[in-house]
């Protein structure tokens, strides 16, 4: 694997020895998330969210498969089927609330995971592929979550589906036929509900596949760390197991406590009351809002209110998709040789006083009605959002004097690195 | 090459959205927004005095209140509103025994098939039946109600913000139009067939006041006086139960789960400390 000092798997008993010879699955796990994977010793709690995201993916698949056993994707019965799960299926309410709140928690941990990546520039070489696959996972998650929200066939399900697929109608020439093709009709109905169910069942397994690629790509250079200084010697790392399994175990506990609070005491807090009204194509809700995790992008969509060469709606659609697609280019936009925001004074200011408050504003405005002053606020925030990634990030390194980096991870942790002092430098500094 | 393109794209999006901002801000600053009666005189729902027994993480059902609320539903609301996701068997959750449930179900006529002729007919309900709708179909419901279909009540308290409080406030909120409203909005009026209610989003509601006099429903001995407020609170509690019969069970499951998770997390914390203490001699932050 990544480092020459990585421990090698030695089967402890004849059964494992047999298995290791015929199908080295235990070896694979050992090297992926066991003692065979050396990890920088200085990871902070922001590095917990990858494992947590994996946990919520599994939770969603398990609860989702059970829910699918009791659900029917037919517009005449879908809503009643969800109530059947809530009322008559043994522990059905637990499955459904776990799945609905599990989706929210999946997005919480993913957003923290992504913003960890922004701050520590986890996307930089040699981890570009890890980042690209991560953005793919995020896009797949958004598609999956959107289609999942349609399945209960409540008012927000129906109108959300109508608004989001309507975005494709903004594309010139092919827009309207494309929208009809996507929905299988002129408005969401049985055809749309069935294909959304089918895809909602399929995509999580696609996500699981890309997650495997994401982890595989990560294991080639090994994990990044808060200093952004690459691993130089064995003293910079500890084996994943037991060190990070223990640390992730504690992090998982904390998140599960929060999850249980939401699940058992506030299960509908993150939902919308209108989704307990059955879908009615003849009655439009006063405010159509997507689920909270789409709010920032929904705010960007609605920020474009003026026709300028292109129609306002098309600008909004382009900007909304661009807002995520630009993440694919980050590894080549940010040219600072220093990875960690910890040693980048100017970048750090733009991150904490620019990007984070702007994301908060976009979150808030995306959930608010399309009225002033929310529209104006989201317009300012949208402008900054694009400037941040496409103008500030490429230019900031030219004006920035990074703070001195520690010689090694060991020095960052212990205050001194004996090898550095003695000059026993195993790998040349990069 | 990629950076100049990115900078151009970034400036492009920002300039377009800032142009929209400038026009929007100009309109906002120059055009006065007209205040509306709905905005100024809508009142947020509030709980009955003392709140509901089911409020809060430790709240439980007040079974006597649920039974009273069921009585109000049956004698008043059921004339127009269905309760289609609730079955008679579910009444066990209200503390009724099997015999009572059978009798209760049998007191309703549900659509059935004549076993001799096969024709559509009505038969007495069984515990497995769901509460029948007062109207044969949506067209009949609309025709009987001035085109406003009375919504199903099973999920009403989950389908509104602060549902139980909303139901209570709406039922007790039929009042005369306040003088200040007429003063501020002389054009405001409640169209014929609608009823003024400040808890309803647009202030005019198609539902006639269902609870009009104290004592409209006669409660059994030992229950509170059936005032309009009491009946409203009771039926709001009942509809909280119909919306989620498993609510109390859910919370009562939650406490031991939470206790276990907190305990496990504390153990995990010390396990983590133990594991790391061996690996990091002289860590700065220990």
Image (cartoon, grey):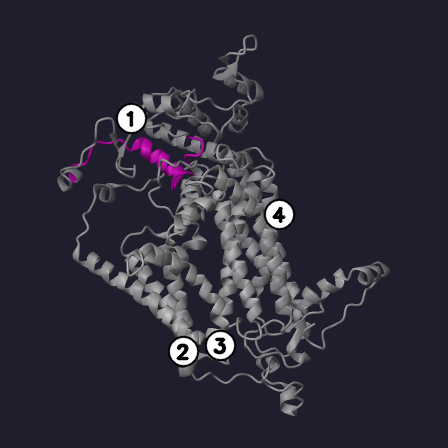
B163 in the magenta segment: yes
How dense is the environment of label 1, judged by Cα within 10 Å: few (below 14), some, or many (20 and up)? Answer: some
Which residue does the numbered mark 2 point to in the structure image? A395
- Circle nearer the viewer, 2 or 3: 2
Q: Check disc 4 and report the residue beneath it.
A: A62
Give the residue at x 56% y 44%: A198
Q: Which residues are magenta?
A: B153-180
Q: Residues within 10 Å of mark 4 (few under 14, many from 20)?
A: few
Residue B208 is labelled as 1
Task: Have a look at marks 3 and 1 and say if they share a chain.
Answer: no
Report in which chain the residue with disc 3 lies. Answer: A
Q: Around disc 3, counting alpha carbons within 10 Å, would you say few (fewer than 14), some (14 to 19), or many (20 or more)?
A: some
> Which chain is home to disc 2?
A
Up-down relation of residue A9 to residue A59 (above or below): below
Secondary structure at numbered mark 2: helix
Image quarter for residue A356? bottom left
Lateral position of residue B170 relative to residue B57, left or right:
left
Quadrant location of the C terminus of chain B?
A: bottom right
Task: Indicate which disc, 3 or 4, sits on the residue closer to the N terminus.
Answer: 4
* N-term mark: 2 or 4: 4
* Residue matched to label 3: A342
Locate residue A332 relative to residue A412 in the image: left or right.
left
Q: Nearer the viewer, mark 3 or mark 4?
A: 4
Residue at (41, 55) in percent of width and height: A295
- Tags 2 and 4 touching, CB below 8 Å: no
Is B212 or A91 nearer to us in this picture? Answer: A91
The image position of residue B224, as x and y in percent, is 39, 26
Judging from the image, mark 4 belongs to the subunit labelled A
Q: Is A164 part of what is drawn in magenta?
A: no
């Amino acid at each position: 694997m990544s480092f020459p000092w990585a421990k090698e798997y030695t089967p402890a008993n004849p059964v494992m020895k047999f298995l290791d010879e015929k199908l080295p699955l235990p070896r694979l796990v050992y090297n992926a998330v066991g003692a065979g994977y050396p990890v920088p010793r200085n990871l902070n709690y922001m590095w917990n969210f990858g494992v947590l995201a994996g946990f919520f993916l599994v939770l969603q698949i398990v609860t989702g498969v059970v829910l699918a056993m009791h659900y029917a994707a037919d517009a005449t019965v879908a809503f009643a089927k969800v109530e059947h799960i809530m009322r008559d299926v043994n522990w059905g309410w637990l499955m459904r609330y776990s799945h609905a709140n599990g989706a929210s928690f999946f997005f919480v941990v993913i957003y923290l995971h992504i913003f960890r990546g922004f701050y520590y520039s986890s996307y930089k070489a040699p981890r570009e592929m890890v980042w690209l696959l991560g953005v793919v996972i995020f896009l797949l998650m958004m598609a999956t979550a959107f289609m999942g929200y349609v399945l209960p066939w409540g008012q927000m399900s129906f109108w959300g589906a109508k608004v989001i697929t309507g975005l494709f109608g903004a594309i010139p020439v092919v827009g309207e036929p494309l929208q009809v093709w996507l929905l299988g009709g002129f408005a969401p109905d049985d055809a749309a509900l069935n294909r959304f169910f089918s895809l909602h069942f399929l995509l999580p397994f696609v996500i699981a596949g890309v997650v495997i690629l994401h982890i595989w790509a990560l294991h080639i250079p090994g994990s990044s760390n808060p200093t952004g200084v690459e691993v130089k010697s064995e003293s910079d790392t500890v084996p994943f197991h037991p060190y990070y399994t223990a640390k992730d175990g504690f992090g998982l506990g904390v998140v599960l406590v929060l999850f249980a609070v939401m699940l058992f005491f506030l299960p509908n807090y993150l939902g919308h009351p209108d989704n307990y009204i059955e879908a009615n194509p003849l009655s439009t809700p006063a405010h159509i809002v997507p689920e909270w995790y789409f709010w920032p992008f929904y705010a960007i969509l609605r920020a474009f209110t003026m026709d300028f060469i292109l129609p306002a709606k098309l600008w909004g659609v382009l900007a909304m998709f661009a807002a995520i697609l630009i993440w694919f280019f980050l590894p080549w936009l940010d040219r600072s040789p220093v990875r960690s925001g910890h040693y980048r004074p100017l970048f750090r200011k733009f991150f904490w006083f620019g990007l984070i408050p702007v994301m908060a504003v976009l979150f808030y405005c995306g959930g608010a009605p399309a009225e002033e002053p929310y529209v104006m606020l989201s317009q300012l925030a949208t402008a900054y959002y694009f400037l941040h990634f496409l103008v500030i990030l490429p230019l900031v390194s030219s004006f920035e004097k990074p703070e001195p980096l520690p010689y090694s991870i060991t020095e960052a942790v212990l205050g001194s690195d004996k090898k550095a002092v003695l000059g026993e430098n195993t790998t040349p500094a990069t | 090459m990629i950076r100049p393109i990115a900078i151009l794209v970034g400036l492009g999006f920002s300039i377009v959205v800032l142009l929209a901002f400038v026009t929007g801000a100009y309109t906002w600053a120059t055009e006065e927004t007209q205040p509306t009666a709905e905005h100024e005189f809508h009142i947020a729902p509030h709980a009955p005095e003392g709140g509901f027994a089911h409020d809060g993480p430790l709240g439980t059902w007040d079974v006597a209140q649920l039974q009273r609320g069921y009585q109000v539903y049956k004698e008043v609301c059921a004339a127009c509103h269905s309760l289609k996701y609730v079955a008679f068997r579910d009444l066990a959750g209200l503390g009724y025994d099997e015999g009572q449930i059978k009798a209760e179900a049998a007191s309703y006529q549900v659509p059935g098939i004549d076993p001799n002729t096969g024709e559509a007919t009505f038969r007495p309900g069984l515990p497995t039946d769901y509460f029948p709708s007062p109207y044969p179909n949506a067209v009949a419901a609309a025709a009987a109600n001035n085109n406003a279909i009375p919504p199903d009540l099973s999920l009403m308290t989950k389908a509104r913000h602060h549902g139980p409080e909303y139901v209570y406030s709406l039922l007790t909120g039929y009042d005369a139009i306040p003088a200040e409203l007429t003063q501020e909005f002389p054009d405001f009026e409640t169209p014929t067939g609608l009823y003024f209610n400040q808890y309803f989003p647009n202030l005019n509601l198609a539902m006639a006041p269902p609870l009009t006099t104290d004592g409209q429903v006669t409660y059994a001995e030992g229950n509170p006086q059936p005032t309009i407020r009491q009946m409203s609170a009771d039926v709001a509690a009942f509809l909280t139960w119909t919306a989620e019969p498993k609510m109390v069970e859910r919370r009562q499951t939650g406490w031991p789960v939470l206790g276990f998770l907190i305990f496990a997390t504390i153990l995990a914390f010390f396990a983590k400390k133990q594991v790391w203490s061996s690996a990091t001699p002289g860590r700065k932050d220990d």
